[in-house]
Image (cartoon, grey):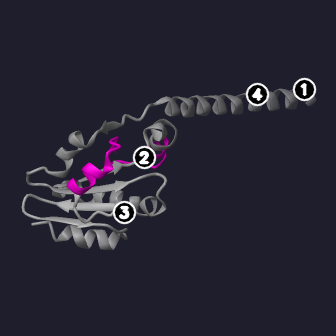
Amino acid sequence: MKYIMTLLILVLLSCKNDVKTKVSLEIENAEKQNVELEVYDFNGLEKFLNQVDDKVHVVNFWATWCAPCIKELPHFEELFKSYKSKGVEVILVSLDFPFQYDKKLKPFIKENKLQSKVVALDDPDMNTWMPKVNEEWTGAIPITIIYNKDKRQFYERSFTYNQLEEELKQFLN
């Protein structure tokens, strides 16, 4: 009986290790999947700020080092999921520093499973491009632009989901 019990315990332990090994391999494979990140200078980014089509565009400038940005980011994700079928496009423009893309930005995108389009702006000449985004922009983030072919609004502030949705609804037909 003692031998049977020992054999049973060994079999059970070996099965448990197989499951752990399989799960570990799946996690390793998932971690190896690379996050693709589109990086633009301001000239390349401008196309996202001035599209003339039948969509409503919500463009949010943020960074992983900005606490208010991170706090409101889930609201943009929720907005994207709720309104993408209604012609709303959400673009998240990261202002993270290029040396942080691999160590901070890409892991953040992956860990938070961001579904909105995320692009990075790599253009150090802020004095030139910031007024092109909006003359009133002081340089603080987060900022959001909501626009369609007929109307454009600039917001230098954070949003709750309800506030963001209320502003968006002014642009929907």
Residue, disc 1: 3
Residue at x-position 25% and y-position 49%: 128
Disc 1 secondary structure class: helix
Cα distance, mark 2 to mark 1?
62 Å
Q: Nearer the viewer, mark 3 or mark 2?
A: 2
> Residue at point 39% right, 58% down?
73
Tag shown at residue 19? none
Mark 1: amino acid = Tyr
Q: Earlier in the sequence, mark 2 or mark 1?
A: 1
Q: Quadrant of residue 72?
A: bottom left
In which quadrant is the C terminus drawn?
Answer: bottom left
> Mark 2 or mark 4: which comes first in sequence?
4
Q: CA distance from mark 3 to mark 2?
A: 20 Å
Name the front one of labels 2 and 1. 2
Residue 13 placement (x, y as % from top left): 76, 31
Q: Which residue is mark 4?
A: 11
Which residue range is magenta in the image?
Answer: 107-132
Which residue lies at the image location 45% right of the left edge and 31% below the top edge? 33
Q: Disc 2 designates what residue?
A: 96
